[in-house]
Amino acid sequence: MSAVMTGFTNTSFKLAARPFGLPKDSDWLREQTPVPAPGDGELLVKVRYISLDPAMRGWMNEGKSYIRPVAIGEVMRAGALGEVIASNHPDFAVGDIVEGMLGVQKYAISNGRGLSRIDPTLAPLPSFLNALGMPGMTGYFGLLDVGQPKAGETVVVSAAAGAVGQVVGQTAKILGCKVVGIAGGQDKCDFVVNELGFDACIDYKRGPIFPGLAKHCPEGIDVYFDNVGGDILDAVMARLRLHARIVLCGAISQYNNTTPIQGPKNYLSLLVNRARMQGIVVFDWADRYPEAVTAISGWMREGRYKSREDIVPGLDAFPETLLKLFRGENFGKLIIEVT
Amino acid sequence: MSAVMTGFTNTSFKLAARPFGLPKDSDWLREQTPVPAPGDGELLVKVRYISLDPAMRGWMNEGKSYIRPVAIGEVMRAGALGEVIASNHPDFAVGDIVEGMLGVQKYAISNGRGLSRIDPTLAPLPSFLNALGMPGMTGYFGLLDVGQPKAGETVVVSAAAGAVGQVVGQTAKILGCKVVGIAGGQDKCDFVVNELGFDACIDYKRGPIFPGLAKHCPEGIDVYFDNVGGDILDAVMARLRLHARIVLCGAISQYNNTTPIQGPKNYLSLLVNRARMQGIVVFDWADRYPEAVTAISGWMREGRYKSREDIVPGLDAFPETLLKLFRGENFGKLIIEVT
């Protein structure tokens, strides 16, 4: 097979080894390779923004999950968006802006599967990896379909200043709920209260969160959207209200464990309170994404909805930037801008 | 106040101290007192059968739960049934057989609240503390309303030979499910398979149950009815099928812990499998008990439904008999016959 080449040079990050605990530099292989022209039915995308998500840590592990693991030697999977610069695909034209699992690289060849064209007039491009992208879809459908909050109920969300947390909290406010965030640091807490309109936010870095939950959720918690697991999940479980719903979206506190996962030791609160805990995976709502994009972009244009990104320039910063997520150092949706 | 006395002598077990770990003899106060005649609107019941349930351990602890704790010095709460031997209550007549929270005692005065008349022609009396009593209602409504099994699905139930387990497994079989029990010992396993018609049963005393689950649930577990928690819950969670439902009914493995509760360390399987875990408390279905009694007693008369009790004679055996539950030594619904 002799491929026609484009003259461009790709930079990609491939998985070199499965991490034990936090990913190390040696778990990555940075590679530079010539970019081939797209084949029949393929298109070539120049990647502009790459989404860094907690879920990526799970994709690096071996074993059965909701999606197959990234193979050793494979370009690291990541949501990203970019511009079509060459196309032999009937549905995509040069100049289209597309979003999908393009991976941690500068150029991506795609057969179009799982790729969607986005309308850049709706919102700034990075929003399509945030409120209008996977985190937005996760927060929107997880909250509405599984959390099922009713006006007047108390909704608590952890990683409140993160990509999913922003969407959950703002959507719950629009529904008429009382919203209490949990976040790390005064800056993030101030942001979700002052900028996003949450009713309160508890800084978990200042000490145990239970007193804050007791203060801000005097009647208990109706819906908890869990992005973190661990001690925070334990504390929330101790304050559930009758018939509470826990939306299990993630457990970032546990992803880099080198010891067994910490199970929620207050889980019998589910029994006492006839409460439920249910897991979600955003892909299950793929056919309804347009519904959420319409709703959220509408709220954004009306000024009722804000989205904050933490955009780091330069693909080479990828290994270090990913670690910011697990250290809670990002402030808003973490995105790499490919420069 | 001078009460009219009946000439009978009551024996009761009162809670003397809150147990730490397994209840000790010194946690009980056995008392003998004269039985007063019932006052206005009251009735007097001669207790015949007392139900011993895992939930009783929780009622002995201090703190908020789905029901207030038994107070120190109070007669221990227990479901029981007996015969009305005197009545000043318009709804109950001498000779009626009644069931309710009559407590661990020989004679009970009641104002009728929470007491129901039972029809002894429907089934043998002990059944009304078993398949037609609280355990039956728990298994029936928990399975149907929360587990929501469909014909052809795989249902797993722990403490399979226990009161709730028998009802869950037999009801699921009648619905057309594949039913796999988990029980302690070959006798119990043989019983649920050969007598109750379960498809298989895993003896947890023979070693880790995961290989058995893999063998008997090759496509995974759709519904798990959890009475035990602990390592068994962990193992089941590792084999959930997509959209599985866990009915959280109890956690007998954890009730006597002197260390913190063991949280389910595989709980992220709920996420991966978009599964849910939901707690139940039987009292929530109180207004629908007659529906279950009609269904189950009908199945019993048709010979499609069996119920096994482990009946221990003599109220004085109460402290030691209760411990059988927590050691897994009872075989079938544990009941004390007041002789």
Image (cartoon, coloured by chain):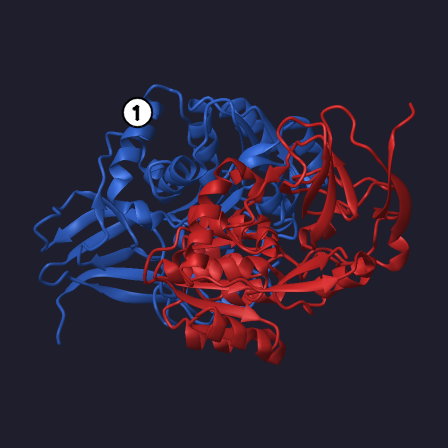
Chain colours: A red, B blue
Quarter assignment of residue A291: top left
Residue A243 x %, y %: 38, 54
Residue A79 x %, y %: 68, 47
Quadrant (top left/top right/bottom left/bottom right) for the N terminus of chain B: bottom left
Q: Is residue B327 visible?
A: no
Q: Tell me the residue at 57%/64% (across/down).
A: A308
Q: Tell me the residue at 38%/38% (across/down).
A: B145
- Where A174 sits versus A74, above or below? below
Q: Which residue is label 1 attached to?
A: B298
Q: Which of B95 and A100 is in front in this view?
A: A100
Q: Is residue A72 left or right of residue B136?
A: right
Q: Which of B188 and A284 is in front in this view?
A: A284
Q: Nearer the viewer, residue A55 or B138?
A: A55
Residue A19 x %, y %: 83, 53
Q: Is residue A253 left or right of residue A166?
A: right
Q: Is residue A313 left or right of residue B157?
A: right
Q: State how many labels appear.
A: 1
